[in-house]
Amino acid sequence: MIRLKIFYTLFILLVMNWFVMAQDDNHVCSTTFPTLEWENEFQKLISDFVGKQSNREVSAMAYTIPVVFHIIHNGKDVGTYPNITHEQIMSQIDVLNQDFGGNAHNVADYPANAFVHWAANQALPEANKDNNGRVKIANFNIQFCLATKDALGQSLAEPGIDRINYHTKGWPDPTNFSTQMTFKNYLDNIVKPNSIWDVKKYLNVWITDKSTLLMNGGVSSVPPMSTLPGIPNTATDSTDGIWCYTKSIGSYALFPFGQYFSNNIDGRTLTHEVGHYLGLRHIWGDANCGNDFCGDTPPASAQNGGMPVYPHKAGSCSLPSNHPDGEMFMNFMDYTMGPGKYMFTTDQMIRAQTAMANSPFRNQLGNHDLCLAVSNLDEQNQTTKPLIYPNPASGDVYVNLSGQNLKRIDIYNQTGSFIQSFGTSVFSVEHLPQGIYFFIIYTDKVIFSAKFSKD
């Protein structure tokens, strides 16, 4: 009896530990992949894609995907949860472009000897390895932008944002649904069909609050294939897209004044779900040492949480063995905390490129002149970025746009609340209290964000 009690105590502690690790950045995914028939068809398309290329990396087609964030809220002012600010959304786009460009902000954390044994033992192609013999961090050549026009072709006041008051729509409160199934039905039968924009033109991302009883922080549709009609768990033109918990959107590091589940939130929930949207599976294949159909990701016994240290769980799988390198916990398709993830692989890139080239809901994205680039001033070339001076300031502020045409400048305070909008490149901040502010500068070509201090 004592042994039984000890067993149950240890079991409960293990479950609680996993729950805490998963909840720390609130990313548990509920994406379900279709049948093996779907995967078999996808593998044929991958073979065709690879067979036509002489160099996998060079042949990666460049795509820019227009994104619309449907912010589902309860009538609160912009900047008051769950009606989050444009700045928080922009920080999410920055993260997506870094992550899918192979240049994640924490990519320097990749160990110098990471997965060199796996690469050698599996005789990975040179295209899958970097100069150190490691499994290479891939650049998908896929970028994301904020949509400039709505579904009717009208210019958006806030690029990439569709704010929806569920009270006005007559929809139920999303926090009323406490099981995964009822919440999915709410999304698929009420929210999505009544707000979706053309899935062949936009990546639709819905963000809502949720019940505290729901662990999942995101779910995505997977790319439907035109040759396989009627396959379960594939999207339709009224459901295709991604849902994320509002407090999992954006990056605390880039915009610390947003509404986040914790300070660990850095946009990786949506990175993970976009991976599914582009055809990627979890690295453990949703089974004990399952198959994610990517030869350059070592097998994993299960999902990982927290912040593991390399090598992690070496020898956890035997067919093939992942000893001595262990599991690729830093892959975006695992459940580790956001700050612990920073890579995709070449085979994952090939899956995404195959989906973009072949899925009828993916292969037209970016072809409709709907994009507006997003740029952080700190990352801009000196010859192109606007010059803001003086900074700090107490009176007039000047914005030199280097030949670009100004549309407007929005100012937000440290809490993310909208303060004021200006339509000229010279304006006064004399009336503002001392503190830190954020400018969002809209031009005819790009959106810039910048931090500003008021003396």
Image (cartoon, rainbow, N blue to C red):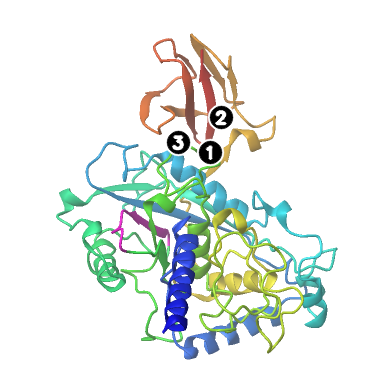
- Displayed quadrant of residue 448: top right
Q: Of the two numbered discs 2 and 3 on the same chain, state the one appearing first in sequence.
A: 3
Residue type, numbered disc 3: Phe
The residue that label 2 is drawn on is 404
- Numbered mark located on residue 446 in the image: 1
Quadrant where the N terminus sits is bottom left
Q: Which residues are magenta?
A: 201-213
Of circles 1 and 3, the one toward us is 3
Residue type, numbered disc 2: Gln
The crowding category of the residue bearing disc 3, from other C-alpha atoms within 10 Å (few below 14, some 14 to 19, many at least 20), is many
Find out whether residue 103 is within the magenta segment: no
The crowding category of the residue bearing disc 1, from other C-alpha atoms within 10 Å (few below 14, some 14 to 19, many at least 20), is some
**Residue 427 on image: x %, y %:** 45, 14
Would residue 120 be visible to someone looking at this image?
A: yes
The residue shown at (49%, 10%) is: 396
Q: Are marks 2 and 1 in contact (CB under 8 Å)?
A: yes
In what element is the residue under mark 3? loop
The residue shown at (53%, 13%) is: 393
In what element is the residue under mark 2? loop
- Numbered mark located on residue 289 in the image: none
The residue that label 3 is drawn on is 257
How far apart are the alpha carbons under marks 1 and 3?
23 Å
The residue shown at (50%, 35%) is: 444
Of circles 2 and 1, the one toward us is 1
Q: Is residue 162 left or right of residue 93?
A: left
Residue in the foreground of this view, choosing between 202 and 138: 138
The residue shown at (51%, 12%) is: 455
Residue in the foreground of this view, choosing between 169 and 372: 169
Residue type, numbered disc 1: Val
Q: Of the two numbered discs 1 and 3 on the same chain, state the one appearing first in sequence.
A: 3
Q: Eyeballing the image, is 419 above or below 354?
A: above
